Image (spheres, rainbow, N blue to C red):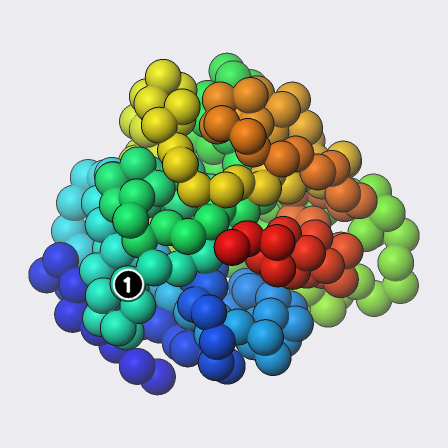
Amino acid sequence: MPFARINGIRIHYEVYGAGAPVLLINGLSAPGVNWLYQVRDLSPHYQVITFDNRGVGESDLPESKTYPTALMADDAARLLEHVGVRRAHVVGASMGGTIAQELALRHPRMVRSLVLACTWAKGDGRFIRTVESWVTLTRKLTLEERFRDVLFPLVYSPAFFERPGALSESLMRVLAYPFPTTPEGMERQARGLLAWNGTRVRDLKKVKAPARILVGRDDILTPPAFSRALARLIPKAQLKILPGGHGFFIEEAEAFNRAVLAFLRRVK
C-alpha cells in the first residue's frame, strides 16, 4: 500500500507490471480499484499506475469546499514525478477524463498519449442536474441504496442488467471495499468538476498528444454526443464507440481494453 505526500496531502497509489508507463485516472467518487480489469489486461505489457484521487479511497480527505480539477491534475503530475515517470500514456474515465484533459493542458510534456473515456468537455443541463442530484442523494441514502438504486441504473447498460449475477457481483464488490467514499469527498469532487465544466473548450485545440476518445453506445450519463463534441475539439482525436453504458470499462472490459491496447501500440 504505497503512499505519496503530494500537494500537502497523502495520496494512495499502486504500480503494476513493467514497460512504458500508463496512468489510469478514475471518475467521480471512484477509487483506483475500479480499474481492476484494466490492470489485469494492461500490466502484462505496460507499467500501470492507479491511484485514489483526493477525497476517496485511502487518500486523504482534505478540508475544502471544492477539489478543483486543475488541482487534481496537479496531483496526478506530482504522483508521476514521485514514481519516477517523466512521461506517460494517460487514460481517464468520466471525471478522470476531465482531469486527463487538464493534465495534458497544464503539463503537456508529461502526457505521451490520451485515452478519454465516457467523458466530456462541456456537459449539458441534464448532466449538471444529474451530478447535483447524486450529491444530494449521497447524503440521504445508505451505501447499498446509493449504488443499487441510483448509480448502477445510470452507469450500466440494459444488457448488463440482463446478465445473470452481474448486478449482485458488482454490488458485492462495492460493499466489500473497506474505504467507501464519504458524502463530503463526493461533494468536493463534484463541485470541482461542475466548476470546470465548459471552461476548457477553447483550449483543447492546444492538446498535442495523440488522443483516442472512447464511449459506450448506451451511455446515458455522458452520451456519445459528448464524445463526438470532444473529438472535434482535440486535433486529430480518434473517436470509437463501443458496447456498453457509462461504466463500459467494467461491463465491457475486454472490448474496452482491446481498444486501449490497440491505440497505445500505435503511439510512437
Q: Residue at x 39, y 26 (%)?
A: 204
Q: Is residue 79 above or below residue 178?
A: above
Q: Is residue 268 above or below residue 1?
A: above
Residue 83: horizontal and vertical position, in percent? 28, 74
Q: Residue at x 21, y 60 (%)?
A: 78
> From the viewer's perspective, is 244 left or right of 174?
right
Binning the other alpha carbons within 10 Å of mark 1 as few (below 14), some (14 to 19) or many (20 upward) gives some
Q: Residue at x 35, y 72 (%)?
A: 13
Please, what secondary structure does the residue beneath circle 1 have?
loop
> From the viewer's perspective, is 34 left or right of 11?
right
Q: Which residue is mark 1?
A: 86
Q: Is residue 36 above or below residue 203?
A: below
Where on the picture, by quarter, is residue 106?
top left
> From the viewer's perspective, is 237 left or right of 61?
right
The answer to whether residue 134 is seen in the rendering is yes
Q: Is residue 228 above or below residue 87?
A: above
* Residue found at the very far left of the displayed protein: 8
Q: Residue at x 43, y 42 (%)?
A: 209
Q: Quadrant location of the N terminus?
A: bottom left
Q: Nearer the viewer, residue 190 or 91?
A: 91
Residue 45: horizontal and vertical position, in percent? 59, 75
Q: How many marks?
A: 1
**Which amino acid lies under the numbered mark 1 shown in the image of this protein?**
Arg
Residue 86: horizontal and vertical position, in percent? 28, 63
Where on the picture, by quarter, is residue 84?
bottom left
